[in-house]
Amino acid sequence: AEDGIRDLVRSRGLGDVYKRQVLYELREPVCRLKMGREYCLVSQESIILPQPKTVGMDQLPLVSGVDVPRDIYKGKRLDSLGLQRAIEIISQIEETGFAKERGLFEIDVYDRHNPVIRLEDKTEINIGKHDFKNKAQALTQVLNDLESKGQKAKSIDLRFKDIVVVPR
């Protein structure tokens, strides 16, 4: 299966009965990626989706810091360790429910060993080599604590044993 189709099954009847059935599953976008002057959608498998889906595109996180080759085109896989790391982080964020609570805007994977998550309120979160799932509870606790005091963070650094918070 190629392009926007993940799985394709074809069948037809035998003998006098002629029946053709085609079942397919479309690839769903998990993030946006800037490609030249436009944004494209990317699937879980790092496939550049061929047909732009404009409805709800703004709700998908933007992935930045990925070097997109000029010869890549829609329908093909983008082999990028940074993009794979971003998609992995997006999956972990969705599993924890953090994105729905806080509003995920962007994941910068210029340095894939030290990705930066940007929330809709402009808070920057450095997660380092850690899995997001392991740090999600502590991060949520820090953000809730700041909100209860009427404060916001400029950045939160989860790379160390003790969480570092830079207030606004």
Image (cartoon, helix red, strand yellow):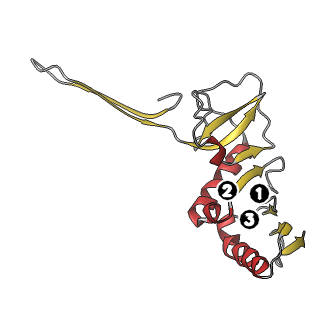
Front-lying residue, 77 or 27: 27
**According to the image, label 2 marks what residue?**
89
| Secondary structure state at the residue bearing disc 2 | helix
Q: Dot 1 corresponds to which residue?
A: 117
Find disc 3 in the rendering and name its residue: 130
Callout 3 amino acid: His
Horizontal side of residue 70 vs 87, given as left or right: right
- Dot 1: within a 10 Å radius of its alpha carbon, few (fewer than 14), some, or many (20 or more) residues? many
In this view, which residue lies farthest toward the left?
A: 16
Question: Is there a contact, CB below 8 Å, between mark 2 and mark 1?
Answer: yes
| For marks 2 and 1 on the same chain, the one whose residue lies earlier in the sequence | 2
**Residue 97 x %, y %:** 59, 65
Indicate the quadrant where residue 51 lies: top right
> How far apart are the alpha carbons under marks 2 and 1?
9 Å
Q: Residue at x 77, y 24 (%)?
A: 70
Quick one: label 3 or label 2, which is nearer the N terminus? 2
For discs 3 and 2, the disc positioned in front in the rendered view? 2
Q: Position of residue 126 (x, y in %)?
A: 82, 62
Residue at the (12%, 21%) spot, across then down: 17
**Relative vertical location of residue 66 with respect to residue 104 in this rendering, above or below:** above
Residue furthest front in the image? 150
Disc 1 secondary structure class: strand
